[in-house]
Image (cartoon, rainbow, N blue to C red):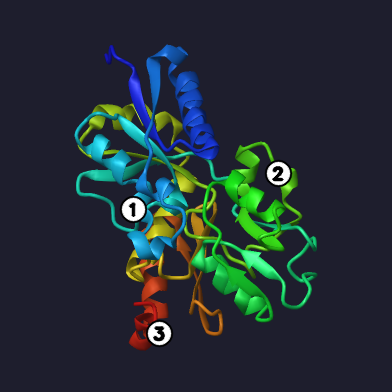
Amino acid sequence: MQMKPYRIGTRGSPLALAQAEEVRDRLMAAHQLPVEAFEIVVLSTMGDRITDRPLSEIGGKGLFTFELEAQLADGRLDFAVHSSKDMATRLPEGLGIVACLPREDVRDAFIGRTAATLDALPHGSVVGTSSLRRQALVRRLRPDITVIGFRGRVETRLRKLAEGQADATLLAYAGLRRLGRPETATQLLDADSFPPAPGQGVICIEARLEDHSTRAFLAPINHQDSFTALGCERAFLATLDGSCRTPIAGHAVLDGSSLIFHGMVLTPDGATAHEVRMDGRSDAAAQIGRDAGSDIRARAGARFFESWV
């Protein structure tokens, strides 16, 4: 029996802390443990510290997890809690996503300062978002709109919006709900026409793959449908070699033993998009994701992907 507290690694934003606390609380309930059985370890990541440049210029999504994964790998942390959509496509050797919480709402929230909906924004309005996927989708739907970079925590981006740096921004509705601020959204964008990022709405737990004791400890709070859907979406991402340079959307939905997948890849300007829809058995989730990615690669051609390099 583990005598010292389980050390849970997390970033320090209010959203990251809320997610780590939700994991802790679920484990407390599952194992009838007191709060003292856990220690939430807050680490500052390079991705949090550098907010004046796009992720693609400073090293990608891994900058949000590097410090956490270093301490996870050497045993200073027992496991780490992440927003799945912020996870790098390829994880460090020996580490893996071993559990997921039940998925929240996958939709993107539109937050308008001068108009309540994306359609209602006046010609020439400015939308701020750091996500290349959101930038490309906005440009696809509203090519008359100017899109600018908008990095930082949820609170930072909302402050920039209130200051008038943009007419609107977009955030994951799941994050707003977890922060207790769902009313901030002025519109929820349809997941079919404005598909989410792979993993959006899923809190995942990363651990050492050979740490079977910790994995068994985490198993009771794993939500299998969310874990399966995430596996499909990340397989799609990996097949496309997805990174912070690639506007990629992917959403898997389970219906009993069946899985339905919708994926989209766009050029950054939103002018060209390739969509794929596939379904199959949920126990073949990863293969469905790989097949969907291969289908898009075959139809788009190599030059489509070279435009991102």
Q: What x and y, as percent, mark residue 9?
A: 36, 33
Residue at (48, 79) in percent of width and height? 267
Residue 42 position, x and y percent, is 40, 31
Q: Nearer the viewer, mark 3 or mark 1?
A: 1
Q: CA distance from mark 3 to mark 1?
A: 24 Å
Q: Is residue 97 above or below residue 245?
A: above
Disc 2 on helix, strand or loop?
helix
Q: Mark 3 sits on what residue?
A: 304
The answer to the question of whether label 2 and label 3 lie on touching residues, with beta carbons closer than 8 A, is no
Residue indicated by mark 2: 182
Which amino acid, by three-letter code, is at mark 3? Phe
* Residue that mark 1 sits on: 62
User: Residue at 67% across / 36% down in the picture?
Assistant: 180
Query: SS of the residue at dot 1?
Result: helix
* Residue depicted at x 42% and y 59%: 232
- Residue 41 located left or right of residue 253: left
* Secondary-structure class at tag 3: helix
- Viewer-closest of 21 and 48: 48
Regarding residue 287, the answer to whether it shows in the image is: no
- Taking 156 as reference, is 295 left or right? left
- Amino acid beneath label 1: Gly
Mark 2 vs mark 1, CA separation in Å: 28 Å
> Could you tell me how many numbered marks the image carries?
3
Amino acid of disc 2 = Pro
Q: Is residue 90 above or below residue 184?
A: below
